Each structure stands twice: as C-alpha cells, then as structure tokens.
Amino acid sequence: MMRNKKAIDVLNKDDLIVITGAGGFIAGALARYFSEQGFARIRAIDKKPLDEWYQRVEGVESVCMDLSEKDNCVKACQGATEVYNLAADMGGMGFIERFRIECLRSILINTHMIEAAYHAGAGRYFFSSSACAYNTTLQEDANVRALKESDAYPAMAERGYGWEKLMSEMFCQEYWAEREMKTFIARFHNVYGPYGTWDGGREKAPAAICRKVIEARDSGKHEIVIWGDGLQTRSFMYIDDCINGIDMIMHCEELIATPINLGSDRLVSINELVSIVEKIGGITLKCHYDPDAPTGVAGRNSDNTFIKQVLNWEPATPLEKGLEKTYRWISQQYADRKAGKRTVS
C-alpha cells in the first residue's frame, strides 16, 4: 500500500473501512484496492440495487442504502475507523449541465455522512471533491493555465455540481477547525478507466469517445459526433493513479482539511483525445461537431505543484496506455451487450 511516511496513526487490517458510492466506478475500485491490500472489514454502500453495481468485491460487506437519508448514514458509519465518501449523483458533462438539482442534492449525503462519521468516532474522513469547484472565469480559454488549489476563490464554481462540492469542502474544513475531526479533500480531475460508465448519458469524454469509435467500427459507418468544436481542453487521470492518490492523501498529516488537486497535468483537446482513440481502434473517422451539446468550460488542467511538494508523487499513467486499457474493456462490454449478456452500463 502506498502509505505516506508522514502519516501518524496506523490503520489495522481488522479496522472497519466504510466506502460510499461503492456501486460506482471510483469507489468500487477503491473497495477492491483495500480488499487486495488484505483489509478484512470493508463496508461498501450505494443506493443502486446490488445487481446493478459496477463491481462486487468478494468478502466485502455490500449494502444497498440511500445516504441522502440521515438514519442510513448513522447505520453506515457504525464502528468505522475510516470513512471514504465518494457517493454523489453525478456523471459526465451531459448529466451535470442538465440535472443541476440532482447534483446539488448530493450535499445532503456529505452533510449527514460527516456528522455520522464524527459521532461514530471515525479517525479519518475523506471527501471526493472535483475540479468543477474551481472559479469558472479562469477556464474560459482552451489554452488555460493549470489551476492551483487557491483558484477556487473568489468562488464562482460550476453551477450545481461545482457549488455542491465547494460547500461540502467547507463542511470538511470546519469539522476539523471546530471538532478536530481529521478530514481530507481531493479535487478529482476527469477520472477514467475500466469498470466505469460508458453509455447511457452519465459517461465522461474518454469512455464516450471509446464507445463511439467502437460503434463506428462495428457499424462500418466511419463517422463520429463530437460535442462542441473539439477544441475544448482537459486533463485525464487513469483510475489506478486516482486510487493510489486517495490512499496517500488520506494518510498524510500535512493534508488535514486541505483541498488538493488529484489529476494529471497533461492538457489535451477533445480532438486530440479522439485521435488517440482512433489510433487504438485502428480506424480513421470523419468528425461531425455538435455546437449545441453540453461542453462545460473551455479548458481545465491540474496544477500539480502542491501534490508533488507534499507527497513527492503525482498521477503518471500515460494517457495512451490508460485509454488502450479502457478501450479494450469497453470493446468487450459492447460485444457482451450485443450477445445479450449483462454489462456495467
């Protein structure tokens, strides 16, 4: 396990780890990660029915529960030593822009979870924030400068989802300031990889583009629709880097109640992303652009100065390598769906 040497208290193998949102992409991978590290007591929670979870990990206590309800949060946190709150109603830009109320309502989850974790005596609490918390006026150009942690203020977060994340960060900071509960906050930048949403409206750009390229190959219609003009830019972080980063951040004393970027600092345009996936798929497509589709900010990148300074580490999986793994997995999912088998999304 990639524990940081600056961590003081030690997590024992029989301590209870609670992971919310575990029926989804990142939290499901986190549950598997801790299980493979030999932790014997993991409680994984999601409101989705168990047969709809992206990953079910053998030996992990898997619970179907809506954590927007206070009583459920109390049950979830009973006996917990560490709590990882990754539960949220969210998705890619198409979902975030169209369902802002659902995104905002996720503040109920963190509000109830952090209070329940505190009363349960949990030693550490992790909150998964987002780069959507950053001031949008700094992201109006595709050639954006990388965003450093202080750029969240003065506040002008992305409507709905971004404001929920920023307010929940504040809860975490105040629980440390007022109640001395150790909280940890990571601002995720576009996480992708296998076992993530790849269809249905909640998928993010890497998975959506992989699916569209696979569909184009399968149909013989060598065309692709790109949202916006394709010039908008982002950085993309592979799932393994995200999980390792969560572990190190959670166990670094210097990062208590301190938001930190967790993302790649390699900025690419959506057009460049398409070109990489075309190469992986061995196909060249004609691009059509949809200027009316949701695109979010013009550009967003992670400034990794702080994480390198504190952890002497940063996400480093090459985009081409991560996308190839993602493409192969989605390709198998696509084939399984055509064959009538159950798939993740």
Image (cartoon, helix red, strand yellow):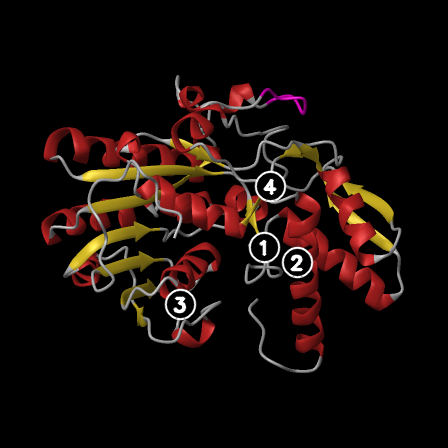
Earlier along the polypeptide chain: callout 1 or callout 4?
1
Residue at 89% across, 65% down: 220
Where the C terminus falls, by quadrant?
Answer: bottom right
Spatial CA distance of label 3 from label 2 is 26 Å
The residue pinned by badge 3 equals 48
> Which of the labelled discs sits on residue 236, or is there none?
4
Residue that protrudes farthest toward the top in the picture: 154
**Nearer the N terminus, badge 1 or badge 3?**
3
Q: Is residue 234 magenta?
A: no
Which mark's residue is nearer the viewer, 3 or 2?
A: 2
150 left or right of 291 in image: left
Query: Where are the magenta residues, as a range?
Result: 140-145
Q: Which residue is mark 1?
A: 193
Which class describes the residues within 10 Å of circle 4: few (<14), some (14-19), or many (20+)?
A: many
The residue beneath circle 2 is 325
> Answer yes or no: do the residues labelled 3 and 2 have beta carbons within 8 Å?
no
**Residue drawn at point x = 86 percent, y = 53 percent:** 223
The foreground one among 8 and 18 is 8
- Closest to the observer, 66 or 29: 29
Measured along the vertical axis of the image, is residue 140 above or below residue 241?
above
Q: Amino acid at mark 3?
A: Lys
Mark 3 and mark 2 lie on one chain; the one further toward the N terminus is 3
Contact (Cβ within 8 Å) of mark 1 with mark 3: no
Tell me if residue 171 comes above or below residue 150 in the rendering: below
Q: As shown in the figure, which amino acid type bears the numbered disc 1?
A: Gly
Look at label 2 and name its amino acid: Lys
- Helix, strand or loop at disc 4? loop
First along the sequence among labels 2 and 1: 1
What is the x, y in percent for residue 21?
37, 58
Q: Main secondary structure of the magenta part?
A: loop
Q: Position of residue 210 (x, y in %)?
A: 71, 55
